[in-house]
Image (spheres, rainbow, N blue to C red):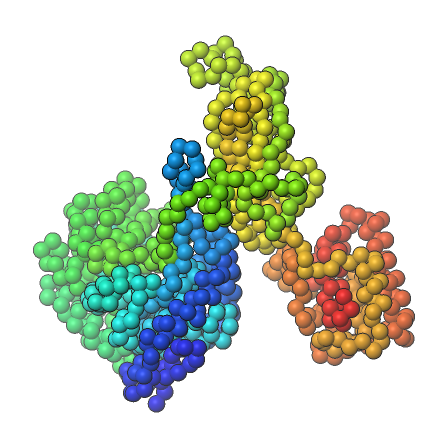
């Protein structure tokens, strides 16, 4: 019997016993059984805490983010295989796209959050807090990764997204995960995890998979663990009450099914774009994933005068929805996940129909394309509840499928009250073109919803829709929705970290946080801080500048230059009753003058001014006052570089401007882009090239590849003849859509991959030799190199074509030469 596998304790395994069978939702065919019997759950949890946790906790946020980004790219390249498996869950291509590429997109989105964290394994939160008048005792908050394991219990409806939207966050926080997908679709989660493990991108132990329900999973949880649950509210409440969770105070986040409501604004009458948007959104939320979404619209709250219009329009729209085999392009709605789920749905609809009327669809009949009754197919169902304030079933019973109920309201207050009667939901929406109605609803309904979408004609084309949780927004809701939050950008990451208040001296806290704290001891330096590369700059490095006296002429000239003629700078007769005593220097002049004092004029590692983060002018500077500056490294932040520039990071500099009496006048935080050291490649001087070629002999063997020494020389000669413009009768082979990316890669410090082939070279075989012998090839190599150097000496502004990298200027041609020679000299071990 085929069984869904688990990945635990560093290996793939299967449980014992028969387990729970899974069936193809479309054909009813057996897929696999899932059993967790025989698994050592305590050992699995401990393996994650130690094996995976120790490695993740030591990684910086940048390392974790880049790891997750690499995983997202790896999985995206293999996405098609998951679509084929996803069809078996009853999902159409569009349904599967939400699950598969939505899950991968979550990885990308969370990976990008690395830019908001320091380049260290822990995070510093908020501003420093001064606890003393003298500034020698202070506090700050840090967040460190919890030393436990994240246990994710997921629902059946999103077997990929449900896993990755949680794991992306805990991995960013430095915490390993144990994932428990619902048995009925665990085979799809298993397929993705197999690719994740095969990639070797994650540290071993960072992800373990228990395919199914392990009832004893909570018996050995510890206080450092974190539990998330997605599923029914009733099940979630039972799990949350587990004695071990209470005893150990284990964080438990629940995202439960909820009776989400969408409101049609009173202004959105038939014929308006908003009315059409409401109908289209309702149809989509009923049919996408066959209504099996925790964010689907279960209650449509519409003005009572429009209820007939909505019912008719929605019925006509649903008539166009074709149901059947999700593999077929013409099919718009697939199947429920299983026959068992179809029976549960039927019971829920029966409960609702005790007071509400079914106005569209039939639970006993459905027209199918390319499928039959063996699959778990149902018709979309729309009910109408005319007395929603009295008949409460519609606010208490969820039919988890393509089912929604229309109900009337008299005014916006009633609409808000009806929405709140669901006792908490993941999401609500209101479709209106009236900002007044939107504000009234949002402000008064927000207490009961985790997210509210305001949809109108202006945002419709860009809107992600009612039912789409987004990685950078919280996903969760109060009350019935579970009372928890997932995702939410930085907020979600912090859920897997421990916040700790730290107290001490500014100097000590500077070392702990990696951020310079005001009043901390300065680190004196031997040269100007702008002469240091990124790697050599440390928080606390400081420079005290020489002094400058601000003159009356300086102030007047600055006013004329900027056209800033504020009276305090230009009209000394108007100072009575103001806070100024004499002609006052512009605040921005003080800042500019400060820059003039601390900026290093010569070219160096500082590539550019990146901006100003904060600035405060604490007291006026008058003409004839003298100022000086203390420039101190405050913080370093990693930066992704994709354009035509060398790798660099951002350095935040704390600028303190003092007067002659050492009183603080102004403070600012400026940002500079600072280049990183180039320590990967050997610079290709004439002497270095000659030295390397001298080591090359006719009998020298390469470390990789099939080139002979003479083939190498002739290949390099051709490269130089292209760089010198002698050879230009070719087309650029790199596709236009990626040419910029390939061109800009010349600026990075990454080596050419081993085995990289030039476009014109024969694959797997050697080119015919051009020159009669090795010595001739060597002479021609040097001749071609001299021609390249001469060309750019005579034409320094020239740009020439390159087959791979596009048009190159003089400097870019050298970058290519440096990478190319380093690559091949390393290949022949002559570097």
Horizontal side of residue 423 vs 787, given as left or right: left
Q: Quadrant of the N terminus?
A: bottom left
How far across and down, in percent of the image, does residue 774 sit? 88, 73
* 450 versus 182 height, above or below: above
Single out the residue that lies furthest toward the top: 573
User: Along the line of sight, which residue is nearer the eye, 547 or 779?
Assistant: 547
Instruction: Determine which quarter of the picture holds residue 802.
Output: bottom right
Single out the residue that lies furthest toward the left. Answer: 390
Q: Residue at x 88, y 66 (%)?
A: 780
Residues 434 and 808: in front is: 808
Q: Is residue 715 visible?
A: yes
Q: Residue furthest bottom?
A: 1
* Identity of the residue drawn at 47% across and 13% down: 575
Q: Is residue 389 above or below residue 26?
A: above
Residue in the foreground of this view, choosing between 373 and 557: 557
| Left or right placement of residue 657 versus residue 320 in this view | right
Q: Position of residue 137 (x, y in %)?
A: 41, 39
Q: Residue 435, how many percent across, how many down?
A: 30, 41
Quarter in which the C terminus is drawn = bottom right
């Amino acid at each position: 019997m085929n069984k869904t596998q688990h990945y635990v304790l560093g290996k793939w395994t299967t449980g014992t016993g028969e387990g729970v069978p899974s069936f193809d939702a479309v054909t009813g065919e057996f897929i696999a059984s899932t059993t967790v019997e025989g698994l050592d759950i305590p050992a699995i949890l401990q393996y994650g805490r130690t094996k995976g946790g120790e490695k993740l906790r030591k990684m910086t946020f940048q390392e974790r983010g880049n790891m997750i980004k690499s995983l997202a790219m790896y999985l995206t390249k293999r996405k098609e295989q998951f679509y084929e498996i996803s069809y078996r869950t009853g999902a159409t291509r569009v349904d599967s796209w939400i699950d598969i590429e939505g899950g991968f997109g979550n990885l990308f989105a969370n990976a990008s959050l690395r830019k908001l964290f320091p380049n260290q394994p822990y995070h510093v939160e908020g501003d420093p807090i001064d606890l003393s008048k003298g500034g020698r005792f202070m506090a700050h908050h840090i967040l460190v990764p919890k030393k436990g394991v994240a246990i994710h219990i997921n629902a059946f409806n999103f077997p990929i997204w449900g896993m990755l939207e949680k794991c992306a966050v805990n991995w960013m926080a430095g915490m390993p995960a144990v994932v428990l997908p619902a048995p009925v679709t665990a085979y799809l989660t298993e397929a993705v995890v197999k690719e994740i493990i095969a990639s070797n991108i994650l540290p071993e132990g960072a992800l373990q998979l228990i395919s199914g329900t392990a009832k004893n999973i909570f018996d050995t949880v510890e206080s450092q663990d974190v539990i998330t649950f997605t599923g029914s509210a009733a099940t979630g409440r039972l799990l949350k009450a587990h004695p071990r969770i209470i005893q150990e105070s284990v964080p438990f986040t629940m995202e439960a099914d909820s009776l989400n409501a969408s409101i049609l604004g009173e202004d959105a009458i038939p014929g308006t774009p908003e009315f059409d948007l409401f109908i289209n959104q309702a149809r989509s939320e009923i049919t996408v994933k066959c209504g099996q979404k925790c964010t689907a619209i279960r209650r449509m709250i519409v003005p009572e005068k429009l209820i007939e219009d909505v019912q008719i329009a929605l019925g006509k729209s649903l008539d166009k929805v074709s149901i059947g085999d999700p593999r077929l392009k013409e099919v718009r709605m697939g199947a429920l996940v299983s026959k068992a789920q179809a029976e549960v749905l039927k019971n829920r609809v029966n409960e609702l129909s005790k007071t509400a009327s079914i106005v569209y669809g039939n639970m006993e009949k459905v027209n199918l394309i390319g499928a039959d009754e063996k699959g778990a197919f149902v018709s979309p169902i729309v009910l109408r509840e005319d007395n929603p304030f009295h008949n409460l079933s519609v606010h208490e019973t969820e039919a988890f499928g393509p089912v929604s109920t229309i109900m009337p309201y008299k005014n916006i207050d009633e609409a808000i009250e009806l929405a709140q009667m669901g006792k908490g939901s993941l999401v609500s929406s209101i479709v209106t073109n009236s900002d007044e109605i939107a504000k009234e609803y949002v402000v008064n309904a927000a207490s009961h919803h985790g997210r509210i979408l305001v949809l109108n004609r202006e945002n419709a084309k860009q809107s992600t829709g009612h039912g789409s949780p987004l990685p950078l927004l919280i996903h969760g809701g109060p009350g019935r929705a579970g009372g928890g939050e997932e995702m939410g950008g930085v907020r979600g990451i912090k859920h897997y970290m421990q916040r700790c208040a730290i107290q001490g001296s500014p100097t000590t806290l500077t070392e702990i946080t990696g951020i310079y704290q005001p009043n901390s001891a300065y680190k004196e330096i031997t040269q100007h801080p702008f002469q240091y590369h990124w790697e050599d700059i440390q928080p606390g490095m400081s420079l005290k500048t020489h002094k400058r006296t601000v003159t009356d002429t300086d102030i007047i000239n600055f006013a004329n230059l900027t056209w800033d003629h504020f009276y305090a700078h230009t009209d000394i007769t108007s100072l009575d009753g103001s806070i100024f005593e004499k002609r006052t220097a512009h605040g921005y002049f003080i800042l500019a003058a400060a820059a003039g004092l601390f900026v290093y004029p010569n070219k160096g590692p500082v590539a550019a001014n990146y901006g100003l983060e904060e600035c405060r002018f604490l007291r006026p500077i008058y003409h004839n006052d003298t100022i000086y500056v203390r420039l101190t490294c405050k913080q370093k932040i990693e930066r992704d570089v994709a354009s035509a520039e060398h790798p660099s990071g951002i350095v935040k500099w704390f600028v303190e401007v003092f007067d002659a009496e050492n009183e603080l006048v102004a403070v600012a935080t400026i940002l500079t882009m600072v280049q990183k050291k180039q320590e990967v490649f050997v610079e290709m001087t004439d002497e270095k090239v000659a030295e390397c070629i001298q080591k090359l002999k006719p009998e020298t063997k390469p470390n990789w590849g099939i080139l002979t020494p003479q083939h190498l020389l002739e290949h390099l000669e051709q490269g130089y003849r292209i760089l010198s413009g002698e050879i230009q009768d070719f087309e650029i082979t790199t596709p236009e859509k990626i040419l910029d990316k390939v061109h800009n890669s010349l600026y990075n410090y990454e080596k050419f991959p081993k085995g990289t082939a030039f476009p014109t070279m024969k694959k797997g075989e050697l080119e015919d030799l051009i020159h009669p012998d090795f010595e001739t090839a060597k002479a021609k190599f040097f001749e071609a190199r001299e021609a390249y150097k001469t060309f750019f000496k005579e034409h320094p502004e020239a740009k020439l074509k390159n087959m791979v990298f596009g048009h190159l200027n003089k400097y870019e041609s050298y970058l290519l030469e440096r990478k190319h020679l380093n690559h091949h000299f390393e290949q022949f071990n002559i570097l």
